[in-house]
Structures are given as structure tokens and as C-alpha cells.
């Protein structure tokens, strides 16, 4: 083995320098990486929130808008007759403050509808049926008979926000 001459030493230094340069560059990239990712526990934008709720900031691109003939009812005997047992056709036990609708059979339970002027226009579920609720009719639920009378009958464009299959 021959002793290293000046050129060999220079070559070794150059290789060492290049290797160190890449190591430092990689290290710097590792250090800067966390600032590009979303920190844990931070608020994920609501666009990723798929839950059906009042949080919908925008409607799905393919929602349906249907004009319906909308009356209102309460759990009293005048409104519900022999079905005035405080339980909806879907089996829901009515609580004061509930917001839901009775819809025709072609709209499945759980479908979320937004009715202008009812529940601040937020989506509410279909939880009930009614003998007179056919075709394009809808009944919005009210806590009291007076509120139901105040609603009267209105023709409104209802948004089907989330369909149940
Ligand atoms: Zn009533």
C-alpha cells in the first residue's frame, strides 16, 4: 500500500465535504418539516366534518329542492287523535323543543330536510308519518297547539339535505 499523496488527501476531503453537505441538508429538511403539517389537536377545517348537523356550512352539490305544502302539528289529541301518545311513527319519544317533520312514505325516516322558517332553516330529520301526509305534503312538529295554528299552511321550497336509502 502506497502512502497517500496530496491529491488523494484532497479527493478524500472533497468526498467528506460532499457527504457532510448532504447530511446537513437532510437534517435541515427534517427540522423544517413539522411546520408544513397540521399540528395534532388543531381544528380540522369543517369541510372534513361529514356529520349531519347544524354545522353544514354548505349543502352537498346534488341536494334536491322540492316545493311542498307544509302544515304544522303538535302532540295533542286535536292534531294526532288516537295516535297522541307522544311517540312518533319512527319510535321517537317526543321531548319539548324537538324539531322534526312528518313526511310521506316515499321519504324514509332519518332523511334530513331544511324547511325555511322552521328550526331556523337548519336540517331536521323525518321522524313521523300521518294519514293526511301524502304526495308533496309535510307536517312540521311544534311543541304547542298554538304554535301549530300560527304556522298555518305554507307552500315552501324544502331542501333534501341528506337522503336515507
Ligand atoms: Zn295540536
Image (cartoon, rainbow, N blue to C red):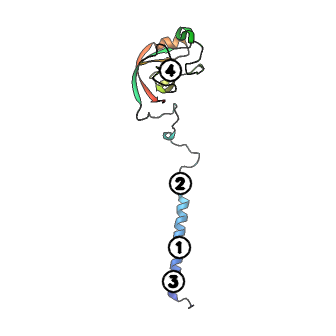
**Residue 122 visible in the shown view:** no
In this figure, which residue is indicated by the disc labeled 1? 19
How far apart marks 1 and 4 lie (CA) works out to: 70 Å
| Callout 1 touching callout 4 (CB < 8 Å) | no
Closer to us: mark 1 or mark 4? Answer: 4
When the figure is inspected, residue 51 is found, relative to residue 107, above or below; the finding is: below
In this figure, which residue is indicated by the disc labeled 3? 10
Closer to us: mark 2 or mark 1? Answer: 1
In this figure, which residue is indicated by the disc labeled 2? 35
In this figure, which residue is indicated by the disc labeled 4? 101
User: Of the residues under marks 4 and 2, which one precedes in the sequence?
Assistant: 2
| Residue 50 picture location, percent across and down | 51, 37
- In this rendering, position of residue 69 left or right of residue 141: left
Residues 87 and 165: in front is 165
Residue drawn at x 53%, y 16% is 142
| Callout 1 touching callout 3 (CB < 8 Å) | no
**Residue 21 visible in the shown view:** yes
> Dot 4: few (<14), some (14–19), or many (≥20) neighbours within 10 Å?
many
Amino acid at each position: 500500500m502506497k502512502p497517500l499523496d496530496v491529491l488523494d488527501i484532497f479527493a478524500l476531503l472533497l468526498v467528506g465535504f460532499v457527504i457532510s453537505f448532504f447530511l446537513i441538508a437532510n437534517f435541515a429538511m427534517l427540522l423544517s418539516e413539522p411546520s408544513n403539517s397540521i399540528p395534532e389537536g388543531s381544528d380540522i377545517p369543517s369541510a372534513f366534518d361529514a356529520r349531519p348537523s347544524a354545522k353544514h356550512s354548505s349543502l352537498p352539490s346534488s341536494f334536491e329542492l322540492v316545493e311542498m305544502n307544509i302544515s304544522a302539528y303538535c302532540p295533542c289529541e286535536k292534531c294526532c287523535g288516537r295516535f297522541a301518545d307522544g311517540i312518533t311513527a319512527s319510535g321517537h319519544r317526543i321531548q319539548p323543543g324537538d324539531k322534526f317533520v312528518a313526511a310521506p312514505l316515499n321519504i324514509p325516516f332519518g332523511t334530513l330536510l331544511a324547511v325555511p322558517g322552521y328550526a331556523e332553516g337548519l336540517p331536521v330529520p323525518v321522524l313521523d308519518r300521518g294519514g293526511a301526509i301524502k304526495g308533496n305534503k309535510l307536517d312540521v312538529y311544534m311543541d304547542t297547539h298554538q304554535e301549530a295554528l300560527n304556522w298555518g299552511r305554507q307552500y315552501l321550497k324544502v331542501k333534501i339535505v341528506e337522503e336515507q336509502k
